[in-house]
Image (spheres, helix red, strand yellow):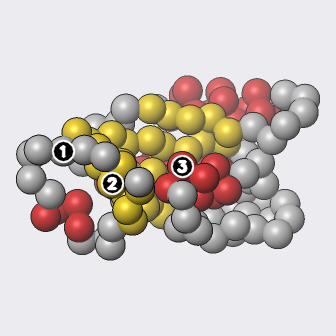
Amino acid sequence: GKGMLNADAASLLDDGFQRHTVVLVGVTGDGKSSTGNTLCGTSAFQVSAGFKSETQELAHADYLCGASFWRVIDTIGLQDTNLTQKEVLDRFSTFSEAAAEGIDCFLFVVRWGRFKPEHDEALAAFALNC
């Protein structure tokens, strides 16, 4: 089973655990926080009701699954509706602060349906800034 950890628990783990870090990336309103909650098996991230971004700053959740320590990092939407593009990219780039052990996977989350121009723009911005 999965077990959620508190914010300081990661520093208490010994080296017997495999560590994995997943960074959720995508546009505002496509389900990054919901995907993070599914991965964690609990409501670790606040989910927005519509297309307005709920995630204004980076958030992360830690959990244990078997002998593995997982950190899921929820980033700000790359097409956030309330911020300038520079503010978005500045806030987005802070994910590295929560990934001291390195990053195993960037998961680009897209809502079911057509890959739209804003997804192309978000993917290009991600590639340019990472």
Tag 3 secondary structure: helix
Q: Earlier in the sequence, mark 1 or mark 3?
A: 1
Q: Quadrant of residue 21?
A: top left
Tell me which residue sits at (90%, 33%) in the image: 113
The residue under label 1 is which amino acid type? Phe
Tag 2 secondary structure: strand
Q: Earlier in the sequence, mark 3 or mark 2?
A: 3
Distance between the alpha carbons at the discs numbered 1 and 3: 18 Å
Mark 1 Cα-neighbour bin, 10 Å: few <14, some 14–19, many ≥20: some
Tell me which residue sits at (44%, 60%) in the image: 60
**Which label sits on residue 64?**
2
Tag 1 secondary structure: loop
Q: Are marks 2 and 1 in contact (CB under 8 Å)?
A: yes
Distance between the alpha carbons at the discs numbered 3 and 2: 11 Å
Q: Earlier in the sequence, mark 2 or mark 1?
A: 1
**Position of residue 19 measured from the top left corner of the image (x, y, whole percent):** 26, 42
Residue 110 or residue 14, whichever sits in front = 14
Residue 47 or residue 25, whichever sits in front = 47
Please name the residue that numbered disc 3 is placed on.
39
Please name the residue that numbered disc 1 is placed on.
17
The residue under label 2 is which amino acid type? Leu
